[in-house]
Amino acid sequence: MKHNIDELLDIAYRYYPRGVGIMDDGDIDVQRCAETEEHDRLVRARIEASRGDRWRGLRRRIQDGFPGRFMNHSLHLPAGRCDACYSFSIDMPESTGRTLWFHVSFLVPYYIVHSERTIDIVKQTRASFSVDFRGLHFSVRRSPFDPRVVARPDDRQKFAIISREYATFDLLPDEQPCAEWISADIEATFGCERMPPEIGTVLVPDVMPGLRLPGEARLYDCLFTDHHRWVEPSPSDEPAPGVQIEASNLTESLVAVLTVLAALYSILWSLMPELQSGSCYWVVRTDGVLRKKELIDALAKIRVLLEPPMTPTGIAARREFEAAARELEALVASWDGEGEPPAAMVAWAWSFLASWPVNSEPVASS
């Protein structure tokens, strides 16, 4: 190796700003990252690399040597976007059925060769489920195997298989001649050497190259590309998968709750300009229990949005919305707030939903 790990980290920090764009709530400010001197340096390096004669020559020789099997993954470099390397792949014959990937960094004198491997991870599903109901997407914080909310629980959904691809540097015997031939050309052309996985997988703190979040970035991500998973995924790192339930499989009690919520949030959504513009995607979250306070709070928001209506839809439907809100307010006021929603409230919700065109796109409220 021509560099030790500390030197490679210093090089990475020249092109990726440390700590910039990481907000207190955990969100990422991509624009702040793009405005830094480090990002500008990386963009200029990409554009300069795209003009290199050595890359064009290597690409031409590989294409001639492997006709119909070569794929160039660096077409974006002239625009200054993506990656810190030249990337290309070779489709291997059917004897392996795999693809060989080659990445040649233009930030450091190293290259890497790898293939892809798939691992199946068995995980227990989450103790919650989602359901599409009356044009809204609901996230229900109840077990999908609870017969009080799901009429016919399916025990086969208790576990799910998650397939994940990751880079493997252990090449098959049939892949090695191809890798050696191309590696020799890369080394002769660029004067570089192969970076071993124990170096490339070292974590780079406080940076966010491309698709990586803080704490996830590795030297491979910073000095080559972030479009591959560089280490075998651990089952503990995989989030529990969710379960989707058909609305027809819900119990009558949960249908009653979701019907009232669907009517309530259909009114609220129709009056909110940010949702009308399509700039938001929210989910209605519920534990399957209707609460009086939630209804009162949502009705208060509806009242504010009705005076005056903020959207053309709201203006046109103000009279209908005001009448529906008054009816629901009366039903809520007479309800003690315990147990399932009263039959009169459910009937009001069904009547409203039947008379008002429910939007086909999932909408939301927290």
Image (cartoon, rainbow, N blue to C red):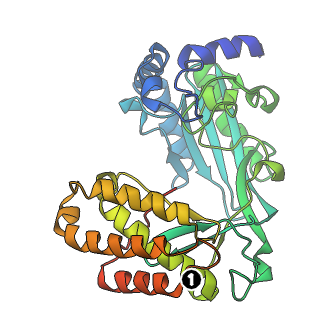
In the rendering, at what x and y percent does residue 118 appear? 74, 58
Relative to 216, say whether 330 is above or below: below
Is residue 317 in sight in this rendering? no
Residue 258 percent location from the top left of the image: 53, 76
- Neighbor class of circle 1 (other Cα within 10 Å; few <14, some 14-19, many 20+) is some
Determine whether 311 is above or below 9 in the image: below
Which quadrant does the N terminus fall into? Answer: top right
Q: Could you say which is closer to the camera, residue 142 or residue 303?
A: 303
At x 58% / y 24%, what residue is drawn? 189
Three-letter code for the amino acid on which mark 1 is drawn: Val
- 366, 223: nearer the viewer: 366
Count of numbered labels shown in the rendering: 1
Q: Is 4 placed left or right of 226 in the picture?
A: right
Residue 332 seen by the camera: yes
Label 1, on which residue? Answer: 255
- Please tell me which residue is depicted at 66% across the width and 60% down the height of the picture: 93
